[in-house]
Image (cartoon, helix red, strand yellow):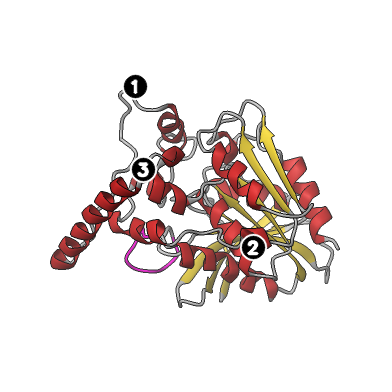
């Protein structure tokens, strides 16, 4: 574990003068070193212990993008926040690069809780997590396993295991899935022969105008000054093609019905991915859950659109849920 101050601003959003940011590193239980940005309010009273929130996502993004924006905004509201790059991604370690794992990416959240739990200015009994897009699904999965987590927020959530196995709106049937697995396993053999990893298709460098609207929305974030970052897979790279095999075969959220902590799920009214949150919400039990549909918002609006992201609601939720 290490902490270092930084003066260089490498984010896609404007720096606030109300928080301090430190570069940090910590290790998950697979021995992978994760890189994060630790945001601390400047007006912290000496020796005080604050509630903390670990934040990651979207899927393929890095801490200099949406997760950092969430972290800085919530730090201005009195939380210690940690935006981190998942394993195999951004400035975090792990090889092969640009690989996803439902187990390891869930563990990444627990590793962030490890780190926050031992900080002198953090109350270890008041730690929450927030996952954006695909890391909303992993955050919910982590909340089902890690009882140290006291509250969880998901924003514009994807279940990456469901979409990998079944396609959008569950349009891939068993036969189509079998053919997909055949293709991916054939590619796995080729990768082993060549010692390289073939890349899955990514966002196009240019739009033709014929793409689905959600691809245009992604492009408008990742491929423009709005959200482009050189470390982001979605901005400038591609996932390893065969990493989707584990996403297909190892579904998350198997025990999400056993989550006993407060859960707040946020999704855009017009998001193509809205059904992920709606279905995950139905599986939650008890009176500790809330699904908030943001009027007029699409999937990507909840990455960085301050007029759409309900930060007042998130702030209130975490303060009420963690301060118990």
Q: Is the magenta stretch mostly helix, strand or loop?
A: loop
Q: Mark 1 to mark 3: distance in Å?
A: 25 Å
Q: Residues within 10 Å of mark 3 (few under 14, many from 20)?
A: some
Q: Mark 2 to mark 1: distance in Å?
A: 40 Å
Q: Mark 3 to mark 2: distance in Å?
A: 28 Å
**For residue 100: magenta?**
no
Give the farthest residue toward the top: 209
State which mark lies toward you, 2 or 1: 2
The quadrant of the rendering that contains the C terminus is: bottom right
Question: Could you say whether the residue bearing mark 2 is in a helix, strand or loop?
Answer: helix
Q: Where is residue 262 in the image (x, y as percent from the top left)?
A: 75, 56
Residue positioned 34% across, 68% down in the render: 95
Q: Name the residue under label 3.
A: 172
Q: Residues within 10 Å of mark 2 (few under 14, many from 20)?
A: many
Q: Give the range drawn in magenta.
A: 91-99
First-in-chain label (1 vs 3): 3
Mark identifier at residue 86: none
Q: Where is residue 69 in the image (x, y as percent from the top left)?
A: 61, 46
The answer to whether the residue labelled 3 contacts the one labelled 2, judged by CB atoms less than 8 Å apart, is no
Residue positioned 33% across, 27% down in the render: 207
Q: Is residue 230 visible?
A: no
Question: Could you say whether the residue bearing mark 1 is in a helix, strand or loop?
Answer: loop
Q: Name the residue under label 2.
A: 143
């Amino acid at each position: 574990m290490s902490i270092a101050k930084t003066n260089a601003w490498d984010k896609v959003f404007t720096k606030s003068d109300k928080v301090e940011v430190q570069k940090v590193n910590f290790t998950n239980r697979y021995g992978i070193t994760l890189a994060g940005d630790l945001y601390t309010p400047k007006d912290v009273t000496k020796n005080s212990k604050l509630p903390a929130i670990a934040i990651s996502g979207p899927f393929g993004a890095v801490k200099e993008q949406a997760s950092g924006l969430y972290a800085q905004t919530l730090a201005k509201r009195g939380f210690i926040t940690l935006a981190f790059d998942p394993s195999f991604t951004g400035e975090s370690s792990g090889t092969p690069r640009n690989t996803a794992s439902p187990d390891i990416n869930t563990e990444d959240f627990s590793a962030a809780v490890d780190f926050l739990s031992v900080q002198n200015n953090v109350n270890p009994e008041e730690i929450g997590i927030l996952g954006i897009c695909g890391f909303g699904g992993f955050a919910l999965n982590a909340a089902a396993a890690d009882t140290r987590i006291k509250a969880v927020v998901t924003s514009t959530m994807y279940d990456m295991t469901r979409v990998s196995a079944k396609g959008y709106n569950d349009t891939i049937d068993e036969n189509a899935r079998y053919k997909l697995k055949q293709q991916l396993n054939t590619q796995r053999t080729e990768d082993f022969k060549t010692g390289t990893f073939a890349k899955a298709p990514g966002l196009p460098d240019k739009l033709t105008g014929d793409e689905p609207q959600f691809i245009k929305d992604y492009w408008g974030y990742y491929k423009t000054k709005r959200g482009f970052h050189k470390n982001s897979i979605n901005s400038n790279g591609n996932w390893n093609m065969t990493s989707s095999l584990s996403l297909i075969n190892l579904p998350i959220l198997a025990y999400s019905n056993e989550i006993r902590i407060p859960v707040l799920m946020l999704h855009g009214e017009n998001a193509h991915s809205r059904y992920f949150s709606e279905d995950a919400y139905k599986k939650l039990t008890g009176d500790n859950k809330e699904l908030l549909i943001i009027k007029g918002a699409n999937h990507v609006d909840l990455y960085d659109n301050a007029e759409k992201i309900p930060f007042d609601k998130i702030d209130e939720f975490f303060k009420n849920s963690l301060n118990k």
